[in-house]
Amino acid sequence: MIRVAAVGDIHLGPASAGTLRPAFEKIHEQADLLLLAGDLTRHGTAEEGEVVAREVAGLGVPVVAVLGNHDYQSDQEAEVTAALDRAGVTVLEGEGTVVNVGGVRVGVAGTKGFGGGFAGRSGGEFGEPEMKDFIRYTRRCAEGLRKSLTMLSDADCAVRIALTHYAPVPDTLAGEPLEIYPFLGSYLLAEAIDEGGADLAVHGHAHMGTEHGMTGDGVRVRNVAQPVIGRAFAVYHLPVHAGDGGGDGDVTAGADRVAAH
């Protein structure tokens, strides 16, 4: 089993420095890697990026992240990314990375993603240039995710995870006002996940949403926004199929357990 810890929407700033560090320092006892699903800062400043970096530095497990909309607010996303990079965090945008967990190759493909809505209630590339740009940006994010997942398959990863900030399915938005669904995610992300293939999809952004969802092809989706999971991080257990990616783990169908913290 691969134990995946995940959380998003921690919204750290100078006033909240150190609040998550006690829980994160014990993460190596409960998980093999940590995923950060965006909105790591309050306003996306370089100073806040340094706060996040100190919170997750030297945890003893690989840390992989994507940024969220809050992390872009001050036009300092490059500085936030640089701070995380110096702390050993891999920040993805339309890319994938492979981490070695006990000899098992675990692939993570990441993108912030964007909005647009879901089947039957979605925007299209029609009309004003601004509307076309909106949907084209989402499409580029989704295409980067699909390509990254496909490359991880070619890299012989035993486990593949899609990491986004925006939601790929409406299931995990249940509890949010219907009127804002188009600004919380896009079906294009789910299509990319299904086409590229993944064992788990993790996102944040929807603070009033629901934890559990699924894509049309049956990929499990988890909303790990901290207000949703109600703890420092959630842990998901993913099976490793014998003979894949160098792993010798047990084969279990659909095993998914959440550890309370």
Image (spheres, grey):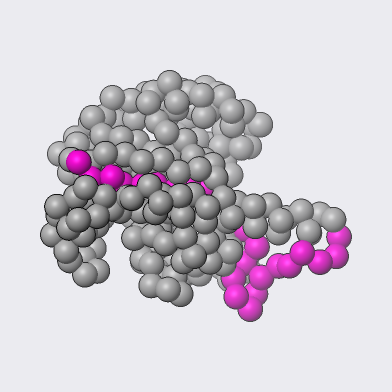
Q: Position of residue 245 (x, y in %)?
A: 26, 50
Q: Position of residue 41 (x, y in %)?
A: 50, 35
Q: Position of residue 211 (x, y in %)?
A: 37, 62
Name which residue lies at 47% across and 35% down. 91
Name which residue lies at 85% across and 56% down. 129
Lateral position of residue 121 relative to residue 109, left or right = right
Q: Is residue 48 visible?
A: no
| The furthest residue to the right | 128
| The furthest residue to the bottom | 120
Q: Position of residue 27 (x, y in %)?
A: 22, 38
The answer to whether 194 is drawn above or below residue 249 in the figure is below
In the image, 260 versus 61, the foreground residue is 61
Please provide the residue range marked out in magenta.
103-128
The answer to whether 165 is drawn above or below residue 254 in the figure is above
Lateral position of residue 64 relative to residue 205, left or right = left
The answer to whether 201 is drawn above or below residue 13 in the figure is below
Say whether residue 110 is magenta.
yes
How many callouts does the rendering have? 0
Lateral position of residue 37 relative to residue 187, left or right = left
Q: Is residue 121 visible?
A: yes
Lateral position of residue 256 relative to residue 116, left or right = left
Quadrant position of residue 79: top right
Say whether residue 6 is magenta.
no
Name which residue lies at 43% across and 21% down. 86
In the image, 243 versus 130, the foreground residue is 243
Name which residue lies at 41% across and 40% down. 97
The answer to whether 207 is drawn above or below residue 83 in the figure is below
Q: Quadrant of the N terminus?
A: bottom left
